[in-house]
């Protein structure tokens, strides 16, 4: 990529939310560099897929959506001015696509009952069947599968707003600031929405929570 | 413990476990749960739930998802007009780079040879032997084709050590100044040098065809029979 383009871009983004390294990477994306897009897909595909899977609960849908999200990133990267970190900007696009997909589902399947069990592998377990831990005992494996199925089911019962905030904070570990940027809400709203979402989730997952009597 | 206070504390538990409560809020929560058992259990359940969710494994990536993403991105990028144009130009221009470079190099070489042959020159030494023939010569050094003064110099010298003088040649080919660099210094040698220098006649150096001043270093060595 021409170096002067990168330097011009760095000048333009002075005082932006990007580090110099990130600004250079964005400049490479804007210059349509093959290697930069490979790096982008390598860096973000797993976490975007994970978020999409937790939000949608379906592997095929999540996989398809990941591709749509990267296409949207490519189409919009030219207008990216560094007002937020690249990761935040990408996840903003991701959540916009995910929530659109959920709204579309809601309209399409308004009268249909979507059972989470439909997406499970017959025995009430989600994809956890494929997940191998380091060296779990059969009991631990069973418990882990049960917990994961319960969490996925509990997430499904939350509203999309509450599910988004739980996925971002408790599963992906985003900071409150990043969540505010991704979802386009204030820090105060992040706090209150997260508190309500956790309270709802806790009710569903109560039997899995270890609470010692004092 | 009042229910109002418990509800207020429970609303603070979510930011508290993320260390996002203010210091006053955190103190309130810590103080309250130390005296209220139900709220302590509530706090424990929040912490336990956060741990439970954080423990769940990441789903395995679907096979070929990354590859398919790259392929779709690549198609989209190639559909972009500018990228397509750039790729086309690359395909057309890349094979031409080597021939073009070779052609330019050869042209420059031929041009240089041609220029050299048009403006060739020679260098003269004290022995009056023509030696170097510079190829690229827009500057012609001073030289002589009349060795009479050298014959004169051969007949007269009687000193033992070599004599080296630097002469400045004017644009008319005559010596306009000289300086003894090394050799014997006595009135006889000085007189001899003056005689020889007055006889010297050169074809002046030229720069772009115009006569210019130049310097010549002459060395005289005695050879005894």
Image (tube, coloured by chain):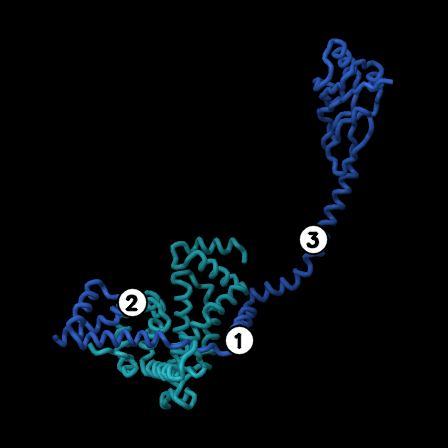
* Tint of chain A: cyan
Do the residues under discs 1 and 3 have CB atoms within 8 angstroms? no
Counting from the top left corner in percent of width and height, residue B202 is at: 78, 23
Q: Name the residue carrying label 3.
A: B101
| Left or right: A124 as drawn, with respect to A68 | left
Q: Where in the figure is residue A124, as x and y percent of width and height? A: 39, 88
> Counting other residues with Cα less than 10 Å from the Cα at mark 2, is it few (<14), some (14-19), or many (20 or more)?
few
Quadrant (top left, top right, bottom left, bottom right) of the N terminus of chain A: bottom right
Residue at x-position 24% and y-position 66%: B21
Residue marked by disc 2: A186
| Residue A192 screen position, x and y as percent | 25, 72
Circle 1 marks a residue in which chain? B
Q: Earlier in the sequence, mark 1 or mark 3?
A: 1
Give the crowd class for mark 3: few <14, some 14-19, many >=20 residues within 10 Å.
Answer: few
Tell me which chain the residue with mark 3 is part of. B
Q: Residue at x 26, y 75 (%)?
A: B46
Q: Is residue B9 above or below residue B159?
A: below
User: Can residue B22 be seen here?
Assistant: yes
């Amino acid at each position: 990529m021409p170096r002067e383009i990168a330097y011009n871009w760095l000048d333009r983004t002075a005082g932006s939310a990007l580090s110099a390294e990130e600004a250079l990477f964005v400049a490479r994306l804007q210059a349509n560099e093959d290697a930069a897009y490979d790096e982008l897909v390598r860096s973000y595909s797993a976490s975007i897929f994970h978020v999409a899977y937790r939000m949608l609960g379906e592997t095929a849908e999540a996989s398809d959506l990941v591709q749509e999200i990267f296409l949207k990133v490519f189409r919009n990267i030219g207008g990216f001015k560094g007002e937020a970190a690249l990761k935040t900007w990408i996840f903003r696009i991701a959540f916009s696509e995910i929530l659109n997909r959920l709204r579309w589902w809601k309209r399409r399947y308004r009268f249909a009952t979507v059972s989470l069990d439909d997406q499970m592998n017959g025995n009430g377990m989600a994809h956890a069947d494929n997940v191998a831990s380091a060296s779990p005992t059969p009991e631990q494996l069973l418990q882990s599968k049960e917990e994961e199925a319960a969490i996925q089911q509990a997430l499904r019962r939350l509203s999309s707003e509450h599910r988004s905030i739980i996925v971002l904070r408790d599963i992906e570990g985003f900071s409150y600031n990043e969540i505010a940027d991704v979802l386009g809400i204030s820090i105060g709203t992040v706090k209150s929405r997260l508190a309500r979402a956790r309270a709802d989730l806790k009710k569903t997952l109560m039997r899995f929570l270890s609470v010692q009597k004092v | 413990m009042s229910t109002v206070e418990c509800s207020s504390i429970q609303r603070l538990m979510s930011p508290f476990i993320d260390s996002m409560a203010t210091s006053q809020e955190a103190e309130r929560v810590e103080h309250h749960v130390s005296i209220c058992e139900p709220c302590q259990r509530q706090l424990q359940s929040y912490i336990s739930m956060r741990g439970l969710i954080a423990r769940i494994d990441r789903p395995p990536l679907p096979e070929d998802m990354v590859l398919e993403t790259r392929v779709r991105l690549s198609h989209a990028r190639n559909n972009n007009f500018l990228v397509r144009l750039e790729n086309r130009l690359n395909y057309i221009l890349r094979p031409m780079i080597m021939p073009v470079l070779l052609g330019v190099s050869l042209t420059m070489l031929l041009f240089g040879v041609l220029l050299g042959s048009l403006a060739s020159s020679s260098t003269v030494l004290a022995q009056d032997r023509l030696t170097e023939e510079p190829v690229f010569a827009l500057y012609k050094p001073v030289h002589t084709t009349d060795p009479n003064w050298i014959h004169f110099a051969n007949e007269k010298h009687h000193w033992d050590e070599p004599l080296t003088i630097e002469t400045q040649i004017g644009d008319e080919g005559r010596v306009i100044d000289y300086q003894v660099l090394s050799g014997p210094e006595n009135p006889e040698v000085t007189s001899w040098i003056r005689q020889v220098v007055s006889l010297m006649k050169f074809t002046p150096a030229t720069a772009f065809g115009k006569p210019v001043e130049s310097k010549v270093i002459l060395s005289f060595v005695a050879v005894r029979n």
